[in-house]
Image (cartoon, rainbow, N blue to C red):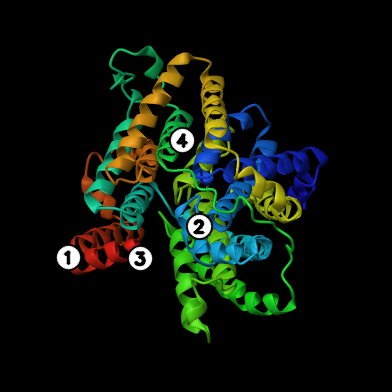
């Protein structure tokens, strides 16, 4: 109740409203997904109190998530991988003059799924927190190894490229001053790197500026320049078709969303496959079937919500968005762990209020977002670049960070050109220092005996799962099925 009272204060509601508006505003820009949007807007939360920063970030996150659906439906340009499925039927609905209905059912399905997932998080948090209290340094090390291996398995593209990105991220996490020896590592004489690389610099470069470069290479798409959005709310028949899909999508996203790496992506694809299999008219999928929008959108939102579970209870980010969340929480002095929901009840309520704000403000503003995506690229991207530069400079007040962001922007562009996802790199960067800390702590307490990592059933199980997953990725049959699934 204390968390609810804090979340419903006028100031926090205003911050959440502002976050949802700004998040949607930038999220609807073609080519920018939640990760890029959060990376661009992260610095504006640094000067706020911890509660206000978290609830504003929740609003930004859900607004950006909905923004990806908007571009998928209106322009057939998915803002992120999990919005690809929405474009299959959503864009056909838009071409048939039902763009408003598609956007409306996407918002309703997202709200229902987000509310259900928030309740599940509240129910699951106590038993997961009890389990987390049994974790020591060896168990946390094993858990992080499993998370990194799972990120490789669920990242699109060749396995070796994903592994290379993970190791590059781990290396970047070592840059700075060693806590034990007080020696500088990999700074190459730059005093600005003595305290390490700020994750905001990497995030903005990899996901913000590099997205701009990639988007500028694409030809402009204005397929709905003359479309008119009339009706937003679905009628009774459309709701009757959509509700079962929303319910099933919520369940699928709740189960798959906990998986590290790409739970929300898997959930949206799995939901679409289930709806098509269960439909009496499977031939209509891909040609404007409302269940093909409602189910994946619900699965996407509940999956994205459930990715908070490993972050809040174990301190392990399930994807690049959660890595950004972890970075902000650490900056604000909030350390995720077994008692974080109990001590920071606002976190729980900010999720639900963020979803509610999304529904309240976005349904009336559908026409505005539709007009926004028609703005020429030449006017949009200079503003995005300016925002990135100002945001990065405001974190450390040094121009070196802006230059470093440019380096990571080129790196992100190069990774995409090579067919390598940059998300595993960010996960490796965030988890690298934690991995090293728990590795050192375990060896220190055991007198340098590596058998300490096999001293408990939990660490043995987690390391065994990581090894089994890694071996399975090397099997030609499973590897070909994985590649075929990503292509499809």
Q: Nearer the viewer, residue 2 or 109?
A: 109
128 with respect to 478 (left or right): right
Q: Nearer the N terminus, badge 2 or badge 4?
A: 2
Assess disc 2: are there few (<14), some (14-19) or many (≥20) residues with their C-alpha within 10 Å of its C-alpha.
Answer: many
Tell me which residue sits at (34%, 38%) in the image: 441
The first of marks 4 and 3 along the sequence is 4
Q: Which mark is residue 488?
A: 3
Q: Position of residue 72 (x, y in %)?
A: 53, 56
Query: Which residue does the image show at 42% across and 52% down from the upper left?
Result: 135
Distance from the alpha carbon under mark 3 to that under mark 2 = 14 Å
In this rendering, would 337 be left or right of 229?
Answer: left
The answer to whether 476 is drawn above or below residue 450 in the figure is below
Work out how far the residue at label 2 is from the one at label 4, CA to CA, in angstroms: 19 Å
**Residue 301 disc label:** none
Is there CB contact under 8 Å for labels 4 and 3? no
Residue beneath disc 1: 476
């Amino acid at each position: 109740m204390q968390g609810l009272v804090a979340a419903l204060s006028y100031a926090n509601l205003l911050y959440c409203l502002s976050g949802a508006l700004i998040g949607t505003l930038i999220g609807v820009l073609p080519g920018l997904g939640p990760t890029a949007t959060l990376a661009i807007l992260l610095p504006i939360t640094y000067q706020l109190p911890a509660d206000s920063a978290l609830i504003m970030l929740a609003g930004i996150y859900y607004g950006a998530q909905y923004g990806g659906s908007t571009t998928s439906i209106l322009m057939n340009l998915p803002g992120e991988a999990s919005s690809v499925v929405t474009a299959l039927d959503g864009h056909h609905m838009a071409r048939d003059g039902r763009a408003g209905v598609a956007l409306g059912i996407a918002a309703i399905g997202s709200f229902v799924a987000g509310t259900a997932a928030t309740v599940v998080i509240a129910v699951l948090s106590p038993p997961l927190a009890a389990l987390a209290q049994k974790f020591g340094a060896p168990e946390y090390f094993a858990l992080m190894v499993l998370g990194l291996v799972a990120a490789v398995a669920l990242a699109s593209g060749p396995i070796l490229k994903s592994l290379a990105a993970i190791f590059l991220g781990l290396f970047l996490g070592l840059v700075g001053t060693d806590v034990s020896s007080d020696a500088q590592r990999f700074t190459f004489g730059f005093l600005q790197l003595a305290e390490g690389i700020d994750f905001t610099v990497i995030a903005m470069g990899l996901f913000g500026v590099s997205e701009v470069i990639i988007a500028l290479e694409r030809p402009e798409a204005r397929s709905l320049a003359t479309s008119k959005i009339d009706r937003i709310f679905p009628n009774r028949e459309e709701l009757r078709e959509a509700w079962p899909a929303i319910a099933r999508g919520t369940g699928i996203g709740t189960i798959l969303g906990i998986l590290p790496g790409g739970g929300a992506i898997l959930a949206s694809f799995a939901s679409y496959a289930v709806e098509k299999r269960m439909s009496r008219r499977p031939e209509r999928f891909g040609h404007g079937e409302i269940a093909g929008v409602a189910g994946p959108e619900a699965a996407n939102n509940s999956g994205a919500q459930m990715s908070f579970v490993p972050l809040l209870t174990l301190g392990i980010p399930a994807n690049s968005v959660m890595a950004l969340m972890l970075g902000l929480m650490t900056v604000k002095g909030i350390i995720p762990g077994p008692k974080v929901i109990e001590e920071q009840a606002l976190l729980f309520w900010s999720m639900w209020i963020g979803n509610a704000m999304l529904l309240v403000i976005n349904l009336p503003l559908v026409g505005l977002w539709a007009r926004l995506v028609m703005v020429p690229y030449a006017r949009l991207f200079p503003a995005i670049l300016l925002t990135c530069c100002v945001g990065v400079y405001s974190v450390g007040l040094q121009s070196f960070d802006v230059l470093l962001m440019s380096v990571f922007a080129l790196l992100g562009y190069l990774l995409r050109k090579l067919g390598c996802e940059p998300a595993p790199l960010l996960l490796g960067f965030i988890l690298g220092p934690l991995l090293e800390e728990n590795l050192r702590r375990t060896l220190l307490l055991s007198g340098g005996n590596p058998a300490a990592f096999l001293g408990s059933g939990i660490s043995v199980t987690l390391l065994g799962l990581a090894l089994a997953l890694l071996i399975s990725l090397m099997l030609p049959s499973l590897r070909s099925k994985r590649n075929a699934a990503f292509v499809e």
